[in-house]
Image (cartoon, grey):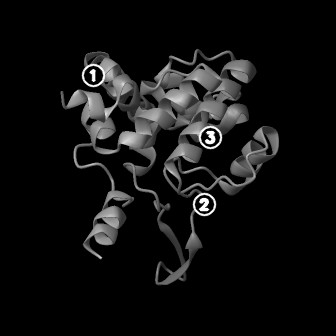
Amino acid sequence: MAFISLFSASCSTTPPKNKHNLCEIFEEKDDWYDAAADMRDKWGVPIHVPMAMMYQESSFRDDARPPRDYIFFGLIPWGRVSSAYGYSQAKTPTWADYVRETGNSGADRDDFEDAIDFMGWFISKTYKINGISKWDAYAQYLNYHEGWGGYKRKTYLKKQWLIAVSKKVKARSLTYAKQLKTCEEDLKSGWFFGIF
């Protein structure tokens, strides 16, 4: 029984304890690095970019949702402001596009492996559609928030708060990139070899 409790705790979907350090995130959530590396190899997207975007979108919470919408002078809750959900805060129609295009029919937005793969797919498409480098966390986040059409129409120019947030995402991605350089070799070798 104790083993089952311990096993259940190890499979917990609680957010990482230190969300500010990518090495500590991957050391704590040891299967996350493998999923992020698979995403990088599949889509050609550097790990630090979607991880910085995911931090901004959900703070690595698997069940993250946007705030509730209210009607009647803000007194009665009336659904959510959008259909965004999960680690990546993917909206339902965009997630459906991802599932259709990739054939990943069993994908769930509250599964880290699926969420990081979705973000790799989106970032890769942003490169194809709008010519934004997969390494450009600032412009990639603007596309992620506004959509490809919104970015082309430059809707973000009327949202100074979004530009400020995108700059934060860029700064975090650069910090994550530096951190990952210091620990990636250990992450590649796996935790078992890291203890010797």
- Going 46% across and 26% down the picture, which residue do you hit? 47
Name above or below for residue 62 compared with residue 100.
below
Per the image, the residue denoted by label 3 is 118
Left or right: residue 93 compared with residue 183: right
User: Counting other residues with Cα less than 10 Å from the Cα at mark 2, is it few (<14), some (14-19), or many (20 or more)?
Assistant: some
- Mark with earlier residue (2, 1): 2
Comparing 61 with 80, the one in front is: 61
Residue at screen point 39% across, 31% down: 169
Please state which amino acid type lies under the numbered disc 1.
Cys
Location of mark 1 (residue): 183
Label 3 close to label 1 by CB (< 8 Å):
no
Q: Residue sitting at 54 percent across and 23 percent down?
A: 139
- Residue contact at pointers 2 and 1, CB within 8 angstroms: no
How far apart are the alpha carbons under marks 2 and 1?
37 Å
Residue 188 occupies which quadrant of the picture? top left
Q: Which residue is the site of mark 2? A: 82
The amino acid pointed to by label 2 is Ser
Q: Secondary structure beneath disc 2?
A: loop
* Circle nearer the N terminus (3, 2): 2
Residue 81 falls left or right of residue 166: right
**Relative side of 125 to 100, left or right:** left
Q: Is residue 160 visible?
A: no
* Image x and y of residue 71, in percent: 56, 79
Does dot 3 land on a helix, a strand or a loop? helix
